[in-house]
Amino acid sequence: MLDDYLKANLASWDEAVGLHVESELYDLQGFRAGRCSLHDIELGELGPLVSDGTTLLHLQCHFGLDTLSWARRGATVTGADFSGEAIAKARELAGEAGLSSRATFVQSDIEHLPERLSDSFDVVFTSWGALMWLGDLDCWAGVVDRFLKPGGVFYIAEFHPYAFLIADDATPESMRIGYPYFQYGRPQRFDEPGDYADPAATLDHTVTFEWNHGFAEVVDPLLRRGLRLDFLHEFPYTIPGLPLDFLEPCDDGLLRVKGRHDDFPLSFSLMATKET
Amino acid sequence: MDGPIPGEARAANLKLWNAWTRIHEKSAFYDVDGFRAGVSSLFPLETEELGPFIHDDTTLLHLQCHFGLDTLSWARLGATVTGVDLSDEAIALARRLADEVGLSSRAEFVCSDVYDADAHLADRLFDIIFVSWGALEWLPDLERWADLVARHLRPGGSLYVAEIHPFAYSLDEVPGLHDVQVKYRLLPAPDRPDVEAVEGSYADRDAVTEGLFAYGWAHSLAETIGSLCDAGLRVRWLHEHPFSPAPFWEWMVRSPDRWWWLPDGEGGHRLDLPLSYSLLATRPEVGATQGGRRA
């Protein structure tokens, strides 16, 4: 069954690549001209640990903009994604940007990555809309641990599990709950024609299966693998592209809950170290 | 030492907890007679998760112990216990109960604000620090709390927390429906306590009270866990649960194992929302790498 979920999600992501490379949200022209696609959260928190020669594995890298942005900051990067379309585009972009010698892209889902990649890394990185595509975070945490060198650091910046609980028709006055925090491994099926980067788009592959993951579901399997939690941060804002009607864009380009800019967490970040 | 709790809040909360102690001593919720007859006040969660760490002569510090039922329940399992609470009436009752059940030699109770506990505990170290159910909401500053915890754990010793989930504190009932919505802030505001006029008690809704106010502070899971990381403790695990030890609304339902649940409308329990959490954090052995990376 999990494979059927994966197949549907893969069809959706393969199709989305063509849309995303043309989208304003991903701004490929800007990237080609040197713009960094990373956000202040991950640059501020992980940036200081990335320098010339840092080896970095980017899990669920889509078509590699963030991966290549880390490469531009000196890292030697490997990006992994289950979408063949995304990986092909990432390799093309690496070539264009003159980063091919320091950027490798591997097509693989998370579960099978250890069969396709044997290195270990100073940094394992993942971000923004990744975990919702994974049904089994225990398996994921094992993969994170597997690819960290002793002393290596895992970092994630993600949408907050609370953000995905709120009903579609919620207002700031009535933040009704429409979705589960605990899913016990069972995905939610969505069938939506649009796309987060282009709501007006009409896609052929509209069905996806997604999992919301509570904090414990994310943190606990990392801890059980023996990783040392360095920090867990929450932010009352998130990056553009989260298509939720109770959010509004603010002057700094970030999204916050309408009229309640300070008190509702929409993102979190976490750093954990594999001790030597 | 000046603690971080403003004087007005401290006075209001002290008055509240003294009044609640008198109500709780007689409440079915706390069932003090049952305790006297040997029933443990601990939930199966705490005995399953922390129980394996408790042996004869384990030293246990219980912060914000109210009138000591849980503290003494750990003592019955072999621990040598120290309970700390702000309320003088609660501490007096705890000492009386320790006497009555013959545990005075292994149970000590200290009347103190958490933040002033050093004045009483000096440099004593404990094997276990225990914190549970509606404790952290009374503390404005979790960094100072976590530092105090770290100072009083022996190397290799562990903090266990079982608490109401921050998400549950943000919920309000939807008018007219047995359903919930997010209403209150979910991120901490140390300088802005929530001040609430209190009627009755979580343990006895019908208790008659007058002129009582509660000063509480919202906390988030990230703040709580981050404070422990920053204090150099190693978080070992984190669990979240869809049940609570006390009802937030009268329409919540209780299961035979004493947990309270949101009803699912079909006679069952809602399993989809977090109402409580538990965690274990350990002070590294001497020489081990220290955690904590402020960013």
Image: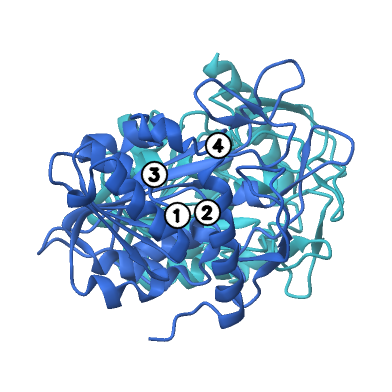
Q: How much space separates mark 4 and mark 3, taking CA atoms?
A: 12 Å
Q: Amino acid at mark 1?
A: His
Q: CA distance from mark 4 to mark 2?
A: 12 Å
Residue drawn 42% across the image and 62% down it: B226
| Viewer-proximal residue among A47 and B188 | B188
Tags 3 and 2 both on a single chain: yes
Q: Nearer the viewer, residue B95 or A272?
A: B95
* Quadrant (top left, top right, bottom left, bottom right) of the C terminus of chain A: bottom left
Where is residue B73? Give x, y as percent: 32, 39
Q: Which mark is residue B69?
A: 3
Disc 2 marks a residue whose amino acid type is: Thr
Amino acid at dot 3: Leu
> Which quarter of the figure has residue A272?
bottom left
Would you call the spot at circle 1 few (<14 residues within 10 Å), some (14-19), or many (20 or more)?
A: many
Q: Is residue A115 above or below residue A173?
A: above
| Residue B48 x/y as whole percent | 33, 31
Q: Position of residue A156 (x, y in %)?
A: 47, 54
User: Mark 4 = which residue?
Assistant: B29
Q: Position of residue A119 (x, y in %)?
A: 26, 45
Which numbered mark, 2 or 1, is in the foreground of this view?
2
Q: Which chain is blue?
A: B
Image height of B288 relative to B275, above or below: below
Which residue sits at x=18%, y=73%? B123
Q: Nearer the viewer, residue A219 or B213?
A: B213
The residue identified by callout 1 is B66
